[in-house]
Image (cartoon, rainbow, N blue to C red):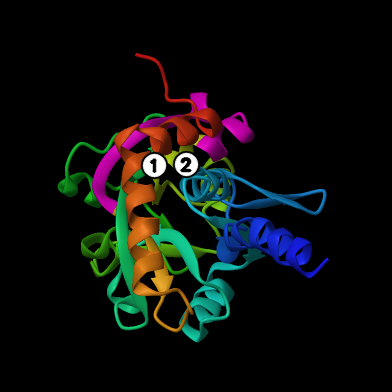
């Protein structure tokens, strides 16, 4: 009986050691990148995270919240990783693991107001330009220009709506998000899209320095993310949610 028990333990032990460990992934509330539908987390970032971690021994668990709360949780090590734009704000508290893809920023305006260069922002027709709260980093040259009248709106979702209602004349936002919102509100025909290109921002897989992930864990996660990027999976997932405009 003792020999049988020992043999059974030896057979079971490898299976136990190979069980996936949970890893907490921060998903921020920002459609279509992160959403909660019927108590289920979905969206671009969550699908991209699933693509990465199915290549590893980890089981990703979504932690859904506002961006500001998610960032504080990352700093404190309450969640392990997220996929987001790299900035100076998070350089001291996060390990930058793997570059994933770029997001573009642009300025859209209503039909009849075209922006081809920076001087066009002084056009009398452009009376008010909108920025979503906390997005001044998208176009600091314009945001800090005293000659330009700005209006701060609560979110990128409201920017296109405010143009359509005549409350602002142009809006600065992430190009892919703007396309999603314009389609959601059936406003694409009323806007100059993709508008005036501003810049692009790299999205990285980033993990908390206070996470219990080991250096070996981070190396394995980086390898998985690099493998997924090489297959262009991140872009494919984005296009499943935000189909590009066909020329």
Q: Which residue is mark 2?
A: 178
Of residue 237 and residue 16, the one placed in the foreground of this image is 16
Q: Measure the alpha-carbon separation of dots 1 and 2.
A: 5 Å
Q: Quick check: is 200 in the magenta stretch?
A: yes
> How dense is the environment of label 1, judged by Cα within 10 Å: few (below 14), some, or many (20 and up)?
many
* x 29%, y 48%: residue: 124
Q: Residue at x 34, y 41 (%)?
A: 227
Percent across and percent down for residue 102 are 30, 46
Q: Position of residue 6 (x, y in %)?
A: 71, 66
Q: Nearer the viewer, residue 45 or 18?
A: 18
Q: Under tag 1, what secondary structure? A: helix
**One can see residue 132 in this view:** no
Q: Quadrant of residue 112?
A: top left
Look at mark 1 in the image and give the residue it sits on: 175
The image quarter in which residue 150 lies: bottom left
The magenta segment: 180-201
Indicate whether 104 appears above or below 236: below
Are discs 1 and 2 less than 8 Å apart at CB? yes
């Amino acid at each position: 009986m003792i020999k049988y028990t020992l043999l059974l333990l030896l057979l079971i032990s490898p299976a136990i050691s190979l069980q996936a460990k949970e890893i907490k992934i921060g998903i921020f509330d920002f459609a279509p990148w992160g959403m909660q539908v019927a108590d289920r987390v979905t969206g671009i970032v969550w699908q991209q995270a699933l693509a990465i971690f199915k290549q590893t021994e980890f089981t990703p668990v979504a932690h859904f919240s506002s961006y500001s709360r998610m960032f504080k949780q990352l700093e404190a090590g309450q969640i392990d990783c997220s996929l987001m734009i790299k900035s100076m704000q998070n350089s001291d508290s996060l390990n930058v693991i793997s570059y994933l893809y770029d997001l573009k920023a642009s300025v859209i305006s209503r039909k009849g107001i075209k922006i081809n260069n920076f001087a066009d922002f002084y056009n009398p027709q452009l009376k008010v330009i909108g920025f979503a709260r906390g997005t001044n980093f998208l176009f600091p040259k314009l945001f800090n220009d005293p000659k330009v009248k700005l209006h701060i709106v609560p979110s990128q979702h409201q920017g296109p709506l405010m143009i359509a209602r005549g409350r602002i004349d142009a809006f600065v936002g992430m190009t892919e998000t703007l396309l999603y919102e314009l389609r959601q509100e059936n406003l694409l025909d009323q806007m100059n899209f993709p508008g005036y290109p501003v810049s692009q921002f790299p999205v990285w897989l980033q993990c908390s320095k206070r996470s219990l992930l080991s250096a070996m864990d981070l190396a394995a996660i980086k390898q998985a993310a690099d493998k997924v990027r090489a297959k262009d999976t991140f872009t494919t997932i984005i296009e499943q949610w935000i189909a590009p405009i066909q020329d």
